[in-house]
Every structure is written in C-alpha cells, then in structure tokens.
Amino acid sequence: MESVQLDKEKIDFVGVFDLERLYKHLYDWLTWRGFSHEEKKYKEKVKGEAKDIEIRWADEKDYDEYTKIIIETVWYVYGLTEVEAKKDGRPYKLNKANLIMMVTAKFKTDKNEVWGKNPTLRFMQGFYEKYLYKNTVDQLKADVWRLGWEYFNEAKQFINVYATELSNVG
C-alpha cells in the first residue's frame, strides 16, 4: 500500500537565489534525517545565455521493518542566469530564474514487496494492515505529513531569505 500525505505541494519563485546552496541545503536536510538519496533525473538545456534545468529526487528512509517514507522533489528552473551581488562590499555570484519546486511525501508498506507478490499473502497483508498495523499506520500518516511539511517549509524559507536580503539585485 502506498499512501500520499503531501501531494506535489508547489513553491513558485521568480527572483534571485543561490541554486547551488539551495540544492546542497536540501540534500543535507534530508541526509541529516537519515534519508538515502537518489537523483533520478538531471536535465539541462542551454538557451542563449540562460539555462533550463529539471531535477528529480527520490529520497527514502525506513520507518520500521515493514514501511518506508519517501520524499520526492521535482525542480524546474527556467531562464537561469548568473547575476552579481555585493554584500559587505564584497562581490559574489548568484542566480536569477523562475524556480518551481514540487514536494510529495508518502509512505509505502510492504517495502520489500514480500506480501504483494503472492495472492494468498496479499489477503493476509490486507488483514494485517487493517487490524494489526492500523495504529502504526495512523501514526505514520501524521509523521509523514509533518515531515513533508517541515521539508517543504525549509525549502520555502531558504528561498525567501534570498528574496528578502537581495530584493535590490539583478
């Protein structure tokens, strides 16, 4: 069984930010919470002096011996260009673009697909999840929902810091 708690929640930002630092910050955030990381896609298209980038992440973490939590992040970066900013009199380079991020947080029971492959065991799986594992599933839904929103808000806050500090750049 797969249960989605946060479904393609969207951040849509146009302005100045540091794509490399955002990427690293979110990667570190997930790693610090015990997620294994897989970059499923990285596609870059150059359009004159600008770039369009698509990135897809799938991060997983075991919840228990039966279930795993999955956070998926899709990044679309349109019209990425480099701009120069000054802070404390020192120049540094940032990015200007339209950034769209979508975050999905979900969990999957029978993470090793032991029960789902066998029709007889599939019946037992339904019984197990409905009656014996029910309290765990209820807690899991709350945990995945909370974790998904924490991650989403972390990304949004990181982006907004640049928007606030650098509204006069570019």
Image: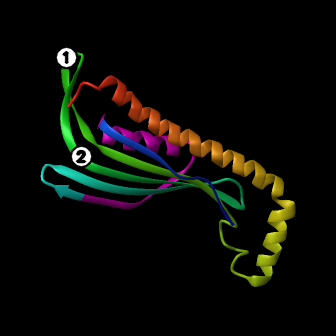
Residue at label 2?
80
Q: Circle 1: is it few (<14), some (14-19), or many (20+) Cα within 10 Å?
A: few
Q: Work out whether residue 34 can be spotted.
A: yes
Locate residue 130 relative to residue 88 in the image: left or right.
Answer: right
Say which element carries label 2: strand
Residue 110's place in the image compared with 86, above or below, is: below
Which of pointers 1 and 2 lies earlier in the amino acid sequence? Answer: 2
The dot on residue 21 is none
Residue 145 placed where, x, y %?
64, 46
Residue at label 1?
89
Residue with the most extreme bottom position: 119
Query: Which one is closest to the eye, mark 1 or mark 2?
Result: 2
Going 66% across and 72% down the picture, which residue do you hit? Answer: 113
Going 40% across and 31% down the picture, which residue do you hit? Answer: 160
Residue 34 placed where, x, y %?
57, 47
Q: In which quarter of the view is residue 56 placed?
A: bottom left
Q: Which residues are magenta?
A: 16-44
- Spatial CA span between label 1 and label 2: 25 Å
Q: Is residue 37 or residue 43 the one in the foreground?
A: 43
Q: How is the image coloured?
A: rainbow
